[in-house]
Image: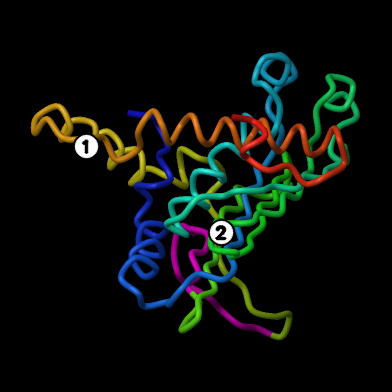
């Protein structure tokens, strides 16, 4: 079993269910925003494999999970806008990836190493019949309005705060596989495909062109 914990997040799982049960209709656009509050320390960045493998890999899996189909082509661009030291390591800290699915549906993934306020984790699936949104989690759902504007809680800070239910569900999913001798919810093949898509994204950025997943093998 591969630890793609976001599959177990109740909000994202509900979006996937709305697609799978036909509520949204055939997916046409899948958009994913995934941005960290602050970049990790440089020692980590030296060994993590780069933003396409460290961050976008989870979003590639989420895009496949939400759409229920395979990504066949990616086009990646990016910049160093957060910390020049990240660029000195040969990496990026701000990226945008365009996706094309097997059906012809399109999508996007945008990543950033820094929002400056909290974890920004949102998904959207626009289908032929409806659009499903999965938004950020906040400590409360309370809003108040005064002459200065409308105010609500800042989203949860990082992954431990944002995804406790997902981590618990992931662990339970693994236990259920062992107890019931069933296939895991996220397989080794899911992990392999996500890594291949990360490789395609890096190749796309390096060569300034769209890259088909079939080029990676």
Where disc 1 sits, the SS reads helix
At mark 2, the secondary structure is strand
The earlier-in-sequence mark between 2 and 1 is 2
Quarter placement of the N terminus: top left
Q: How many marks?
A: 2
Q: Which mark is residue 14?
A: none
Q: Nearer the viewer, residue 59 or 203?
A: 203
Distance of label 2 from label 1 (alpha carbons)? 24 Å
Taking the spot 36% from the left edge, 70% from the top edge, the residue there is 18
Q: Identify the residue shown where x is 9% and y is 29%.
A: 179
At label 1, counting other C-alpha atoms closer than 10 Å, the crowd grade (few under 14, some 14-19, many 20 or more) is few
User: Residue shown at 39%/28% (left/top)?
Assistant: 188
Mark 2 surroundings within 10 Å by alpha-carbon count, few (fewer than 14), some (14 through 19), many (20 or more): some
Residue 172: image tag: 1
Task: Name the quadrant containing residue 6.
Answer: top left
Q: Which residues are magenta?
A: 132-146
Where in the figure is residue 42, as x and y percent of width and height? 75, 19
Above-or-below relation of 151 to 165: below
Query: Where residue 111 sits: x, y (%)?
Result: 70, 46
For label 2, the residue is 122
Left or right: 177 as drawn, with respect to 168: left
Can you say which quadrant of the picture contains the C terminus?
A: top right
Asked which quadrant contains residue 181, the reply is: top left
């Amino acid at each position: 079993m591969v630890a793609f914990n976001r599959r177990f997040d109740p909000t994202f799982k509900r979006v996937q269910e709305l697609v799978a049960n036909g509520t949204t209709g055939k997916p046409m656009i899948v958009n994913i925003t995934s941005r960290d509050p602050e970049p990790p320390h440089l020692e980590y960045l030296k060994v993590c494999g780069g933003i396409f493998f460290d961050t976008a890999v989870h979003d590639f899996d989420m895009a496949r999970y939400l759409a229920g189909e395979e990504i066949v082509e990616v086009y990646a661009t990016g910049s160093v806008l957060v910390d020049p030291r990240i660029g000195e390591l040969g990496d990026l800290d701000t990226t945008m990836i365009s996706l094309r699915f097997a059906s012809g549906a399109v999508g996007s993934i945008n990543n950033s190493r820094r929002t400056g306020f909290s974890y920004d984790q949102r998904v959207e699936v626009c289908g032929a019949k409806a659009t499903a949104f999965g938004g950020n989690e906040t400590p409360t759902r309370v809003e108040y309005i005064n002459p200065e504007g409308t105010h609500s809680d800042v989203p949860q800070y990082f992954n431990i705060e944002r995804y406790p239910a997902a981590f618990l569900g992931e662990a339970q999913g693994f236990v259920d596989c062992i107890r019931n001798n069933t296939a895991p919810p996220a397989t080794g093949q899911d992990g392999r495909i996500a890594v291949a898509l990360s490789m395609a994204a890096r190749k796309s950025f390096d060569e300034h062109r769209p890259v088909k997943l079939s080029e990676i093998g």
